[in-house]
Amino acid sequence: MWLGVSGAVVDGAWCPGDVEVADGRVAAVGLPPARGGTIAVPGLVDLLCHGYAGVDLASATVEEIGTWRVALARDGTTAACPSLLTDDPARTAAALARLDTARDTARDTARDTARDTAPTHPGRGAHLLGAHLEGPFLAPARIGTHPPEHRRDPDPALLARLLAAGRVDLVTLAPELPGADDLVDLLRARGVVVLAGHSDADAPAAHAAVDRGVRAVTHLHNAMSGLDHRAPGLAAVALTRPEVIVTLIGDGHHVAPEMLRLAAAAAAGRWALVTDATAAAGMPDGPFRLAGVPVTLADGVVRNDAGGLAGAAAPLVRGVRTAVAAGIAVLDAIAAATAVPARLLGRRDVGRLAVGGPADLVLLDESLTVTRVLVGGRDLDREGTGE
């Protein structure tokens, strides 16, 4: 099957010509191009997503997690780390267990779907990567919308309990807290990527965290010490340490265009777009819940009862468009939503378009709007949510 595109982003570079897909994989690139401006890019990868399409992952059933996966894929995200806000540890452990069950269900259904014996809904949504625990080991001064009653000081026993409850790929913590070094060591030993976020670290503490093994920061500039020219904090250190990937929310509300350009320039090739999406994503204005916290979507912005930003409601592809509108090169913006997050996870089977690789692909028109999505080489039904 030829996709009918004029070109593709192949291993991060522009490749003119059409793309052929066969047996769930990319069979060829650089074929005689189709007319028009449609291009093929790797499926997008979201490292921070708390919900979507009315689904709050903190309380979602296995069936609702399937709905979340399909809604994400319809908007071009074909792999995502389900993210859990600071919560009661028992509820977090239960949510991790449900995610593991959903992951097993998706795997079984995908095998059946390949034999055309199962419905398309559960097996053809976004790939369910390991969870991202955003908390509970966060700085009180940078807690944001996270429920303060569930915030915890670093506790290796609690962390071990959560890691035992279900698959975890990423953990965000405040590295300046007493005892945080022990958590970083434990996570690295378990193969979990450590991110700094919701942190009030000064520059020495931030440098020490990177030296210890912190490899990324969660939503740069939001809920962290910043860029003061005499008292730089976590944001400044992250932008100046070449081993750190900086993630940013590209919804047009959390970060100004100038700060997007600054990150793209200072952290070239190591900045990643995330959504920080909530159940409000893809939904009309109204009230929602974020791990039990009441939030409201109005005019594209999600806020808590105090009026502060509380997650987001835009799809990841919106972040790509926001970055391009800010003056960032298209290829760099696409890499920030595909190759860079995949690199942080240490994976080559997502966020990549290459001959022989999985055909998880997104077709974009000239306005960078999603027109078609393939997961495992099969078309995803585009009815319902989408952008």
Image (cartoon, rainbow, N blue to C red):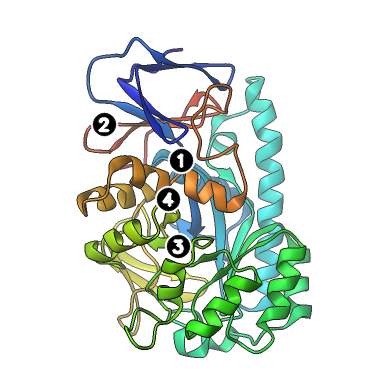
Instruction: Categorize mark 1 by other alpha carbons within 10 Å: few (<14), some (14-19), many (20+).
Output: many
Q: Earlier in the sequence, mark 3 or mark 2?
A: 3
Q: Inspect the image, locate mark 1, and give the three-letter code of the amino acid beneath it.
A: Ala
Badge 2 amino acid: Asp
Which element carries disc 4, helix, strand or loop?
A: loop
Q: Earlier in the sequence, mark 1 or mark 4?
A: 1
Q: Is residue 101 above or below residue 33?
A: below
x then y, percent, for residue 324: 25, 48
Quarter of the rendering occupied by the C terminus: top left
Residue hosting label 3: 246
From the top left corner, tell me how far across and down residue 333 is, in percent: 34, 47
User: Local crowd at mark 3 within 10 Å, few (<14), some, or many (≥20)?
Assistant: many
Q: From the image, tell me which residue sits under label 4.
A: 269
Left/right of residue 329 with respect to residue 181 in the rendered view: left
At a point 60% along the width and 47% down the height, the residue shown is 128
Which residue bears the numbered disc 1? 73
Q: Nearer the viewer, mark 3 or mark 2?
A: 3
Q: Look at the picture and state if 371 lies above or below 33.
A: below
Report the residue marked by disc 2.
Answer: 365
Question: Disc 2 versus disc 1: distance between alpha carbons?
Answer: 17 Å
Q: Nearer the viewer, mark 3 or mark 4?
A: 4
Q: Nearer the viewer, mark 2 or mark 4?
A: 4
Asked whether residue 385 appears in the rendered view, the answer is no
Q: Label 3 vs label 4: CA separation?
A: 10 Å
Find numbered disc 1 in the image and state the secondary structure of the residue it sits on. helix
The amino acid type found where label 4 is placed reads Gly
Mark with earlier residue (2, 4) = 4
